[in-house]
Structures are given as C-alpha cells and as structure tokens.
Image (cartoon, rainbow, N blue to C red):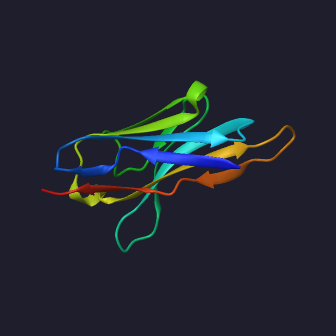
Amino acid sequence: QVQLMESGGGLVQPGGSLRLSCAASGSLFTVGIMGWYRQPPGQQREPVAVISSGGTTNYADAVKGRFTISRDNAKNTTYLQMNSLKPEDTAVYYCSAAVITQAMGSWDPYWGQGIQVTVSS
C-alpha cells in the first residue's frame, strides 16, 4: 500500500505565504510524477502543479509566478511553496503521485486525503 500525507495548510491573509508538504510512504518501488491539485468550495478538482522525477515542472495559469513545486526524491516528498496568496486560492489541496509498487509492476495513481488552505482577512 502507498500513503500520501499532506501537511502545512491553514489560514493565511491575502498576500501571505504557505508551504505544503506531501510525503509518500509504503510500497514505493518507483515514484514518478508528483503533483498538487485543489478543489475550491462548490467546484471540481483542478490541477495546480506537477513535477517529474527529473524535476520538470508544469503549472496552472492561475498560479504561475506565485507557486513553486519542488521535490526531494530521497525523501519521496514534494513541496508546494505558495506566495502572494489570494482569496480565490482557498481550496482543499490534494497531493498525488504515480507509483510502481513492485518490480515489473505498472504505474498506479495515489492521492492524499487533502488539506485545507484558506486565504482570508
């Protein structure tokens, strides 16, 4: 089994910063692309940022220039540094990872339970 544990959410004022972390644990033969998604209140889940094991990144237009995704492969952990936060960034943020759990296995997607980020004065 694979577990993804998010941390670092909370309440922040507009213009503030937060850093989310997501650590993968369990049967990790290979960890591939890791990413962050979010689900604003009353809306569908949407992609925020993804990063490959080699460090290639992609961002949603809404967060470009404000959010930075990174990862530590040795720790199987990804981070999301969020700066210049806006009220519209308020959402439940989910971590995801593509994982192979055993030799000759296939890629399977895994999700964290989600963490609340609220941007409000």
**Identity of the residue drawn at 51% across and 46% down:** 5
Residue 32 in the image, given as x and y percentages of width and height: 66, 39
| 25 sits to left or right of 115 | right
Q: Quadrant of residue 26?
A: top right
Q: Is residue 92 above or below residue 22?
A: below
Q: Quadrant of residue 115?
A: bottom left
Q: Nearer the viewer, residue 99 or 2?
A: 2
| 47 sits to left or right of 17 | right
Residue 66 in the image, given as x and y percentages of width and height: 30, 41
**Identity of the residue drawn at 17% across and 45% down:** 15
Quadrant (top left/top right/bottom left/bottom right) for the C terminus: bottom left
Q: Nearer the viewer, residue 2 or 100?
A: 2
Residue 65 in the image, given as x and y percentages of width and height: 31, 39
| 32 sits to left or right of 60 | right
Q: Is residue 66 visible?
A: no
Q: Nearer the viewer, residue 59 or 43?
A: 43
**Identity of the residue drawn at 51% across and 57% down:** 113
**Identity of the residue drawn at 72% across and 51% down:** 108
Residue 12 in the image, given as x and y percentages of width and height: 21, 49
| 108 sits to left or right of 37 | right
Residue lying at the far bottom of the rendered structure: 42
Residue lying at the far right of the rendered structure: 104
Q: Is residue 14 visible?
A: yes
